[in-house]
Amino acid sequence: MRRFWLLLSVFVLVGCPTGEEIIGLDPARFTDVECAPVGDSRCLEGMFQTCEGGYWYNQELCGSVCSLDLGCVACEPLMGRACDGDNVVGCNPDGTLGSIQQTCGLGGCVLGQCEDDCGEGTDLIYVVDRDDRFLSFDPWEDAFTFTELGTLGCPAGNQLAGWGGGVGQGTPFSMSLDRNGVAWVLYTSGEIFHVPINNVDNCQPSPWVSGSEGFELFGMGFVSDEIGGEAETLYIAGGTATAMSQHLTGRLGAIDPETAQVSPVGSLTPSELGPELTGTGAAESFAYFPGVASSMIARIDKFTGLNAEEWAIEPLDGQLRAWAFAHWGDRFYIFVTWQDPFDGSQISQVHRFDRITGDVEIIIPSHNYRIVGAGVSTCAPFVFQ
């Protein structure tokens, strides 16, 4: 797992470079490093700085955590969880420690989770594209980088009759990631394969039986059974291959990871296109409902399948060709490929939605992967609202 160590450095404070005293500020706290715009802020080796009069100003040396938005705090809200001794606790939106979510062994709490609870690398997002390329996507500190881990060689059978007429080998359709670092990749053959993220060449069939309870093709996402808990369930949204080829919304189901048995939950809220799912360690399930006329993100009621909370977002400018969806740090990452209606070209992008502000930004305007599945484990950072 990724480790962070807080480095507290002693700063040499210099006088205000302009030689002018700004009312209310200590001239000795100004650095000689220029900045812009005025009012901007940053964290530098534990020091919270703001841009004042064109130069970085040392506001405070943090004793614990420096947050870009809040300054010195006890914990970073975007992480969702923090350590308080050997306890995993929530991190409140104001950067204060919240209630206990889990107790680890002696010295076992690291970066807001029990150290031995999650597999290596399960704090990242993983994606698979139409051409079987398997990649990690790093959202830490807004890195937004793809890393190719290999090309899947899963022995998928022919496509389902309702999807490709039974002609041609199945291709990836969706995926999710469990806490052990194993990706569950669904193919258009209706089969689910297990792919370890640290050895993508070792693709193994899962015990999932295609068509169980009428589920052949679906979006999916692992969700913790309780806040901060280790037990999790794989929720799926879809139905028969024929229904999915007709862009019907489908139903919600729940797969037991131990037995691969599915239990139907209920009908999903009707939408233009079927959703992709993602889940969190806060025991919440979310769906991305794409569309040309309208699009939205919703929190799904795990007991009924209906939308418990909705956020309308702008639809894309062209017809969707592929989409995937993942939660991370209380933000949602939307991987889309859409076709330009004017020249017919296909454009692959990554968008990020913030459910607190309601803002959507395009963080990667163009890349070379037609992503059809995204998985994030319940070990990833979350914020419980």
Image (cartoon, grey):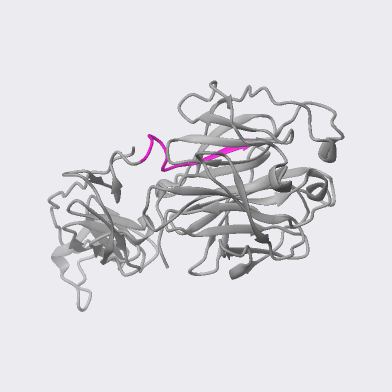
Name the image quarter holding residue 168: top right
Q: Residue at x 70, y 26 (%)?
A: 156
Judging depth in this view, the residue of 252 and 352 nearest the camera is 252
**Residue 89 point in image, percent of width and height:** 28, 59
Decide if residue 277 is on the left or right side of residue 385.
right
Judging depth in this view, the residue of 62 and 93 nearest the camera is 93
**Residue furthest right in the image:** 165
Name the image quarter holding residue 28: bottom left
State whether residue 146 appears in this view: no
Image quadrant containing the N terminus:
top left
What residue span does the magenta drawing correspond to?
Answer: 118-128
Q: Main secondary structure of the magenta part?
A: loop
Judging depth in this view, the residue of 53 and 48 nearest the camera is 48
Q: For residue 124: magenta?
A: yes
Decide if residue 292 is on the left or right side of residue 136.
right
- Compared to residue 327, the image places residue 126 above or below, namely above
Q: Residue at x 77, y 26 (%)?
A: 169
